[in-house]
Image (tube, helix red, strand yellow):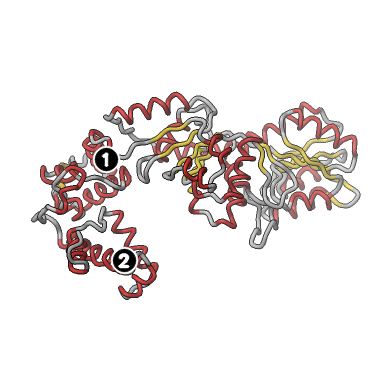
Amino acid sequence: MHVLVIDDERAVRDILVRACRGAGHSVDEAKGCVEAASRLVRGDVDLALCDIQMPDGNGVDLVRSIRESGIDTHFIMVTAFASMETAVEALRVGASDYITKPFNTEEVLHRVQQIAALRGLRDENLVLKRIARRERARFRFMSDSMQAVERLAGKVAPTDSTVLITGESGTGKGVLARLIHEQSRRAEHLFVPVNCSAIPENLLESEFFGHVKGAFTGADKARKGLFLQADQGTLFLDEIGELTMPMQTKLLHAIEEKEIRPVGSEQGRRVDCRIVAATNRDLQEMVREGTFREDLYFRLSMFHIHIPPLRERHEDIEALIEFIVDQARAQRGTGAIPMTIDPDAERALLDYGWPGNVRQIENVLNRACILAEDNLITCGDLPAEIAFASGRGGAGASRGTPIPGASLRDRMREVEAGFVYEMLSLCDGDRRAAAQRLGIGLSSLYRKLEEFEAFGLSRKTPFARQLSRRAHPGVE
């Protein structure tokens, strides 16, 4: 916790600063209201031990102005001018507590710890809410490769080692990171996930390390930052390979020194969070290319876990199908009729290659459970790309014939996907040019491509191949 001691008496400040530092808190000091206000408006002070009567102002007025600014700093008022009226006024404007001089340092530290506990309760409540939301049955893997992954996670979880998780998109890297957190000594603190590729480059430092009020244009209030949010818990850095080189340098310093400095602050903050990183990129190749720091790679890959793609562990697919369908039934409430899968649909699901891995199979089956009539999933409830599959891994899709149960909507989506992908091919992958030729906006094209991917449609749909043969005779 970061404490600010505000008192015009040097001796009093020295006593309080030594006591708070001895208790493990980071401490700053100010000798009057004006100096204190300039520190407090930055928004990075958790608790202020504040005198009431000072030469340049009144502590009660300081509390009032800080509260009106919306800054979330706790105040314990310390004064030699003890009166019930002053105490009531200080509490009324937002102070948390009130003690008088001369004071016992042990009593002061007791009050400080009470405030620290109060601030911690809010984070604990967040943890409990998150745990309650995700409380559900856990899938049991059938494949030897994933059972080995679970064993590795179980071994590293109780340690504080950084962990690097690699694997294709949709393989469940985030799920594994959360499992490691839940099995660690940090499980009662926050698990803070962040997608590094989703943060604009100019906001990376502020998002990771926080900022004080007024640090830059638009910083109208202080921000805690991801590292401080994850203090005592786990910070999950997904898509770590997307970070810029300057940010990689700052991240390495924060991990090695266990200290961050919010943007605009002169005060470093100690932080203790476990780092779990994930990527679908080849970081070793990026190191060779000079786009990823070698020292950061070695720091992150202290313990490396690779998750194999779903196509390499076919024995998990059947179990996943059963698990996801059962979960969908459970969400409909107690007493819901069990969902069943038509043999042809089950065969199509098992034969498909699942390029989108677990994420794709979840999307497909959750959609099928919504579309299914009479609690029976048929081929008509599956995307056409999957319903057409007739060989292991979808290889037979090019030879397959349309399954009579496929819905008109699925067929139309496949036709649309084939036409869009063929236009992209004719435009050599230039999405802007393809959007213009299709007569749609670029953002609409991106949405359609995301939809096609979610439903397992690719350039290899039967209609796309047919268009390709027309546009490029003799080329398969």
Count up the numbered dots. 2
Q: Nearer the viewer, residue 254 or 7?
A: 254
Looking at the image, which residue is at 67% across and 37% down? 270
Looking at the image, which residue is at 54% across and 28% down? 160
Q: CA distance from mark 1 to mark 2?
A: 27 Å
Circle 2 residue? 424
Q: Secondary structure at mark 2?
A: helix
Residue 419 vs 88, above or below: the answer is below
Locate residue 313 relative to residue 195 in the image: left or right: left
Number of residues whose C-alpha sits closer than 10 Å to that of mark 1, classed few (under 14), some (14–19) or many (20 or more): some
Q: Amino acid at mark 1?
A: Arg
When asked about the image quadrant of residue 21, the answer is top right
Question: If you read the primary sequence from the N terminus, does the residue marked by circle 1 or circle 2 appear first?
Answer: 1
CB of mark 1 within 8 Å of CB of mark 2?
no
Circle 1 residue? 311
Residue 184 vs 448, above or below: the answer is above
Q: Is residue 103 visible?
A: yes
Closer to us: mark 1 or mark 2? Answer: 2
Q: Nearer the viewer, residue 84 or 265?
A: 265
Residue 393 vs 109, above or below: the answer is below
Q: Residue furthest front?
A: 474
Q: Secondary structure at mark 1?
A: helix
Number of residues whose C-alpha sits closer than 10 Å to that of mark 2, classed few (under 14), some (14–19) or many (20 or more): many
Looking at the image, which residue is at 32% across and 75% down? 437
Q: Amino acid at mark 2?
A: Leu
Residue 62, given in percent of the width and then of the height, sits at 78, 51
Q: Quadrant of the N terminus?
A: top right
Q: Quadrant of the C terminus?
A: bottom left
Residue 399, given in percent of the width and then of the height, sits at 12, 52
Locate residue 51 relative to residue 225 in the image: left or right: right
Residue 242, given in percent of the width and then of the height, sits at 50, 50
